[in-house]
Amino acid sequence: MSHTIFDRLEIPHTLAAGPGPGNTDPRVLSQFATAGVADHMQPDVLRGMIECKQMLRSVMGTKNIHTFGVAGTGWSGLDAMMSAVMPGDSVVAFVNGTFSGIDGLTLRMKAATAEELAENPSNPTAASVTVIEVPHGESVGAEVIEAALAKHSPQWAFMAHYETGSGRINDVAAFSASCEKHGAMGLVDAVSSLGIDDFAIDDYPGVAAWASCPQKGICCLPLTYAPVSFTDQYINVLKARGARTFVHHPIMEARHWGIVDGEDVEKGSYHRTHSSYAVAAFHEALRLTLTETLAVRAQRYTFHEAAVRGAVEMMGCTVTSNMTSLVVLNLPEALAGREMELVQLCRSRGFGIWPTLSEPVQVRIGILNQLDIDAITDIVTRFANAIEELGGDVDLPAVKQFLEQHYQIEAAVA
């Protein structure tokens, strides 16, 4: 039998300017690439894991002992967070974009009875789950949250903090308050807010579980650790009823990080074969986050997002998002309907912007870990060039003048 030996795979560097994954910090990449080939029980690997969970508690702003990283992407963390939802559990899920929609589907699959799941395994209609659809481009607000939880009094309530499908920030404070008021246990998808917004999860006592990802605000590699955090109340539910997963079972996962019976075991217990490379990268990403501080990073995101927003509006685009790491926009009227064409053009030039993944089709430009004038100017210039290439009209000198004036404000403040 003959075998095809393909050429060596060469992947060029591109500018990741979408909703995520973001551009991993070179210092994190260096830690990943230079970590020694080490046994997973080597003392420095174990020390790194201990320090990672301690730093992660600081980043998330919590005293929750069950705070650690689930090996994998953000989906791994979300699966762990939703694992306590059992068939027949009452759930209210707020959906206002692609990713909260997928989270809602996951909850329907978790809460579906055996009969409901058998009827439609990939898209079950679970009678115990109420999905509150908020129109694309709108945030989930206090009135909608309160009305739904007051009406249904669910055991579980779910919401995304930042919804990257539509670029909207949802009201997590109102969500937490309503969960407390109506006795629901809140579940929050913080995939796109952790490391970008300045918040502490302990300020939201109605939320029992949080899940995030490594490659957005934390700016690590996509396949390292998805941050999660669980309250004692949530863990007690798991102890009483079990979980709908074994791979991402929060109590079992916690043991891999030396969290046993609600306490830290710091002597280096045996664990899943965690990679020394992943531990080193995650450790460095958390160090950089805490060194900069969440307050400073959040201010930088707000400032640089305003630069991109103002620049694309000068090109005739209409921005419909309010996230600080992502601009979601409609193209100028003359280019309406050509969103996918523009995105593909940009991607062919090594400029990785994204369309929305649901209707209406819009364009998404992200600034993850691109927080300086040179990076923002590069993003704006590439986008302007693409619009011009499709026949749009852009006054690029005026746009660049706007950016210069915007960044003179930063220089004056500094």
Image (tube, rainbow, N blue to C red):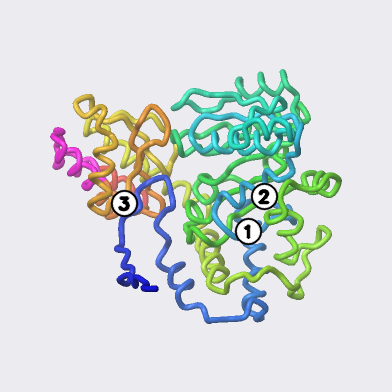
In this view, the residue in front, 202 or 383, is 383
Residue positioned most to the right? 240
Q: Is residue 401 visible?
A: no
Region rendered in magenta: 380-403
x%, y% of residue 366? 37, 45
> Which mark's residue is nearer the viewer, 2 or 3?
2
Q: Secondary structure at mark 3?
A: helix
- For the residue marked with disc 2, what is the amino acid? Ala
First reached walking from the N terminus: tag 2 or tag 3: 2
Q: Which mark is residue 69?
A: 1
What separation in Å lies between label 1 and label 2 (alpha carbons)? 10 Å
Label 3: how many Cα within 10 Å (few below 14, some 14–19, many 20+)? few
Q: Position of residue 93 (x, y in %)?
A: 63, 30
* Residue 88 placement, left or right of 145: right
Which dot marks residue 128? none
Q: Which of the two discs, 1 and 2, sits closer to the camera? A: 2
Q: What residue do we see at 75% from left, 24% from top?
A: 153
Above or below: residue 31 compared with residue 153 = below
Classified by dominant secondary structure, the portion drawn in magenta counts as: helix
The residue at which mark 3 appears reads as 411
Q: Say which amino acid is labelled 3.
A: Ala
Question: Which is more N-terminal, label 1 or label 3?
Answer: 1
Q: Looking at the figure, which quarter contains the N terminus?
A: bottom left
Along the line of sight, which residue is nearer the eye, 362 or 52?
A: 362
Lateral position of residue 336 relative to residue 99, left or right: left
| Residue 80 marker | 2
- Mark 1 or mark 2: name the one nearer the start of the chain: 1
